[in-house]
Structures are given as structure tokens and as C-alpha cells.
Image (tube, rainbow, N blue to C red):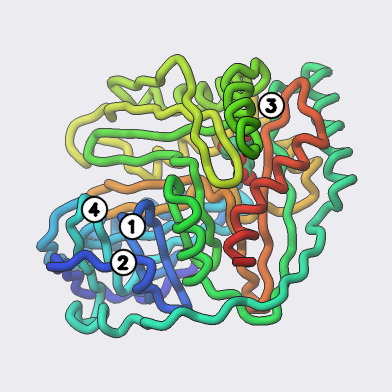
């Protein structure tokens, strides 16, 4: 575990008279984001940071945040979810083996139901931080070159065929197999313009950035507001089509027995993991369609009320996130067999791709999505990044169709890089 900024500074939240465009405030380096339809949180600077790996990673992070936030001198004049001290988090797909990153920003600007605020931790003056933000749009990245990641497309299709055979042999019901794509640009990649383009093209997604992992995810793993819990489970994907073909593809997805079965496994996995923490938990019987610019998904919004009295009597949000992750939307069914098959077949390290990403405040309110449709910017080379995309494989999955699905999913970040 590494930590920085161990002193206990003052935290001040000041309401803003005018709601700023959040993403336009971000600096070039160290951008933190969780924004949908102009609302959410952006942050920058590091008042404290934790990197943690191991079987107790989330418990250690939760204890660290509880201790840190309890010791702060807080003046919160907004008093809404996301005001006061905030922790941004990007958790490894496998927190026992990969590094999860937690950052308390020096500055957070938030917007919720039209109300806006700025929170500073440490010495920054709330009156200065908004005017200090850059106003000019950075230049584009120039020419882009793509290269295969761990597996070339043919090899990845062969792995999908192996997974289908293993499912057919009765070893498991579903596994999510992902692949990576490397991109190198002429010029350094700019987090601000990537986030702005993702947000413009994907208004129904959460545009996130933590420690140079950025993307626009349509999938909400868990939101907590007081005792209220909610989640948007996705699984089952179809391409978009032109004209009348698009409506046909939508109808086919909604009536596809294969996609409905794949979707049901993902909903079941979330409900089963969350049920012990809830007094009520409701999932509609039928999924809906979620239509994005590049693909269409089957979607189920699950809502619940958390069990337990008072903030101390209830499980914390990081504990809940640890309990529900990984759902069958990003791992498979049963979880253990699917995780083992991912390790055997994918041939790559997912890092924080498909892990929970989001924020939690000192009350324990917060939102975590799954880090999908994303790019991991290279720590060594400002012009390169790794893109990730995966698909649920079930009995009857066709490798070529799954490959096309990864290409459609890569296109979310590719469009932001190329436009
Ligand atoms: C794994 C990804 O997406 C997940 C897999 C889906 C599917 O297989 O249909 C749909 C949405 C996500 O839950 C990804 O985008 O990389």
C-alpha cells in the first residue's frame, strides 16, 4: 500500500451561483471525472492517494477512507451527495491481483439537479480554482496507428470457439472474453478532448477518468444515496443498422433467446450478491433496450433499499461494490469457473478495465460504474493507449459475430480519438 499527503487538511464546499460546464474545467494532467448529461463530479490534484493490491484490497481502502475522512476538518455548505470530502476510485478487475487506485482530489467541482458546488481540500482557495482552469481546446492527436494487443483477431476467435466448446461440455454457462487494441498517435493524447467527445457522443453513458483510465460506460454497477441502491445491468448486445435495418436489429435483440439468457445470468448475479444487504430489491421481469451511438444493449435497472440502521449500521459502499463485483456482465457464470477461464484464454492483464470505477463521499453516498468502452493511457508514452472490449460468450455464440461486437465497442473510444 502506498499513501501520500498524510496531513489532515481543511475541506471546504462552497455552492456556486452559476453551474459550470464540468468537463471544460479539467486540467491536462490528473483529470478525474464522473459525468453524465453535464452532471456529476470532476476533480484534479491529489490531496491523498492510495494504491492497493491483494485479497483485502477493498476492505483496506474502505478503512483508509473512513480514517482519512473522519480526521478532516469539513465545512460543507452544500450538503448533497458528492459535496464535502470525495474519493475517486478505479478498482482492478481482479483486486486481489491488480492495482486499484484511490484519489482524494485537491479540487472537486460538482453539479446535481442544477445545483453546483466546488470543494477544496488543503490550501486551494475556492474563488481561484475555477478561473485557473484552461479555456482553450487542445489540438487533435494527428495520425493514429493501431496494432493488435495480446491476440490477433484470428487467435481471439479461436479462444472464443474454445470457450463455446467448454460451455458445451458443461463446465460453465457464460464467460466474458475481452481483447485489447493498441493505439499510437503522432501527438500526445489529451484526456480533456477525449472526455468531451465521449460525453457529446454518449449522453446516456457516464464519462469517467481516474489515473489515466478513461471512457464512457453505459453500465452502472451500484449507486447509493442514503439507503437507496440502484444498478443498471447490461448484457446482450446488437450492432446498430442503417434505416429500417436498425429497428429490425432492435426487435431481434429484444426477442433473442440467446441474448435474453445471457442477460438473465448478469441480472441474477447482481441480485444474488446484493440481496443479503437489502430489505427490498426489485428487478423488472423484462429487460429494456439501451440504444447507444455504436451498439444496442439489453438493460435492466435494479433498485433496492439497504438493510441496517444509520450509516454505521450499514455496509459501506466499497464493501457493497466488493460484494457484487464481478457480476456475470463482465466475468461469467459461475464466477469462479469463468474467472479461471478468462485467465486461461484471454492472454492479457485486464488491469482496471471492467473493474468498478466511480466515487464515494464521506457519508457513503456514491456511484460506481464498470470501466468499459475505455482506454488506458500509457504511463511511459503520452502518445499511446490500450483500448479494451469484451463480450459475453454463451452456448451458441459465434466467434465472428463476437469479434464484430468487440470492434463496435472499440469504436466508442476510436471515434473520440479520430474526430
Ligand atoms: C465487456 C463489455 O461489455 C459488457 C458485455 C456485454 C455483452 O456481452 O453483451 C454488454 C455490456 C457489458 O456488460 C465491454 O464493453 O467490454
Q: CA distance from mark 4 to mark 1?
A: 9 Å
Between the residue at mark 1 and the residue at mark 3, the CA separation in whole angstroms equals 36 Å
Kindly state the secondary structure of the residue where label 3 is placed: strand
Q: Check disc 1 and report the residue beneath it.
A: 38
Name the residue at the front extreme.
243
Q: Earlier in the sequence, mark 2 or mark 3?
A: 2
Counting other residues with Cα less than 10 Å from the Cα at mark 4, is it few (<14), some (14-19), or many (20 or more)? some
Q: CA distance from mark 2 to mark 4?
A: 12 Å
CB within 8 Å, label 2 to label 3? no
CA distance separating discs 4 and 3: 38 Å
Side (left or right) of 357 relative to 12: right
Closer to the eye: label 4 or 1: 1
Q: Nearer the viewer, residue 129 or 357?
A: 129
Q: Is mark 3 within 8 Å of ligand 1?
A: no
Label 2 crowd bin: few (<14), some (14–19), many (20+), radius 10 Å: few
| First in sequence: mark 4 vs mark 3 | 4
Separation (CA) of disc 2 from disc 1? 7 Å
Which of pointers 4 and 1 lies earlier in the amino acid sequence?
1
Residue, disc 3: 174
Instruction: Find disc 4 in the rendering and name its residue.
Output: 112
**Viewer-nearest of labels 1 and 3?**
1
x 33%, y 57%: residue: 38
Q: Is residue 140 above or below residue 410?
A: below
Amino acid at each position: 500500500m502506498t499513501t501520500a499527503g498524510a496531513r489532515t487538511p481543511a475541506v471546504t464546499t462552497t455552492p456556486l451561483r452559476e453551474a459550470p460546464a464540468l468537463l471544460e474545467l479539467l486540467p491536462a494532467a490528473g483529470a478525474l471525472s464522473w459525468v453524465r448529461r453535464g452532471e456529476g463530479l470532476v476533480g484534479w490534484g491529489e490531496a491523498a492517494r492510495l494504491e492497493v493490491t491483494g485479497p483485502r484490497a477493498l476492505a483496506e481502502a474502505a478503512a483508509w477512507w473512513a480514517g482519512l475522512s473522519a480526521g478532516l476538518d469539513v465545512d460543507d455548505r452544500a450538503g448533497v451527495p458528492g459535496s464535502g470530502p470525495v474519493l475517486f476510485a478505479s478498482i482492478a478487475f481482479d483486486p486481489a491481483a491488480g492495482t486499484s487506485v484511490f484519489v482524494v482530489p485537491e479540487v472537486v467541482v460538482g453539479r446535481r439537479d442544477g445545483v453546483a458546488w466546488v470543494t477544496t481540500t488543503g490550501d486551494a482557495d475556492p474563488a481561484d480554482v475555477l478561473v485557473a482552469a484552461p479555456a482553450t481546446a487542445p489540438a487533435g492527436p494527428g495520425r493514429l496507428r493501431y496494432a493488435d494487443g495480446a491476440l490477433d483477431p484470428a487467435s481471439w476467435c479461436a479462444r472464443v470457439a474454445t470457450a463455446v466448446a467448454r460451455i458445451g461440455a458443461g463446465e460453465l454457462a457464460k464467460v466474458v472474453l475481452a481483447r485489447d487494441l493498441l493505439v499510437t498517435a503522432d501527438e500526445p493524447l489529451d484526456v480533456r478532448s477525449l472526455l468531451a467527445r465521449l460525453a457529446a457522443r454518449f449522453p446516456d453513458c457516464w464519462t469517467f477518468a481516474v489515473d489515466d483510465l478513461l471512457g464512457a460506460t453505459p453500465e452502472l454497477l451500484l449507486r447509493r444515496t442514503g439507503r437507496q441502491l440502484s444498478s443498471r445491468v447490461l448484457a446482450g448486445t446488437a450492432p446498430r443498422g442503417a434505416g429500417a435495418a436498425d429497428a429490425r436489429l432492435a426487435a431481434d435483440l429484444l426477442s433473442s433467446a440467446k441474448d435474453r439468457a445471457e442477460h438473465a445470468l448478469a441480472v441474477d448475479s447482481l441480485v444474488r450478491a446484493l440481496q443479503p444487504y437489502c430489505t427490498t430489491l426489485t428487478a423488472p421481469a423484462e429487460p429494456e433496450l439501451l440504444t447507444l451511438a455504436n451498439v444496442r444493449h439489453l438493460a435492466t435497472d435494479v433498485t433496492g433499499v439497504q438493510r441496517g440502521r444509520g450509516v454505521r449500521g450499514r455496509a459501506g459502499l466499497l464493501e457493497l461494490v466488493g460484494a457484487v463485483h464481478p457480476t456475470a456482465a463482465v466475468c461469467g457464470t459461475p464466477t469462479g469457473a469463468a474467472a479461471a477461464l478468462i485467465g486461461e484464454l484471454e492472454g492479457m492483464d485486464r488491469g482496471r478495465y471492467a473493474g468498478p470505477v466511480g466515487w464515494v463521499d464521506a457519508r457513503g453516498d456514491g456511484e460506481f460504474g464498470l470501466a468499459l468502452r475505455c482506454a488506458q493511457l500509457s504511463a511511459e508514452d503520452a502518445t499511446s493507449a490500450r483500448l479494451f472490449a469484451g463480450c459475453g460468450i454463451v452456448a451458441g455464440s459465434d466467434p465472428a459475430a463476437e469479434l464484430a461486437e468487440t470492434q463496435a465497442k472499440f469504436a466508442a473510444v476510436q471515434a473520440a480519438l479520430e474526430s
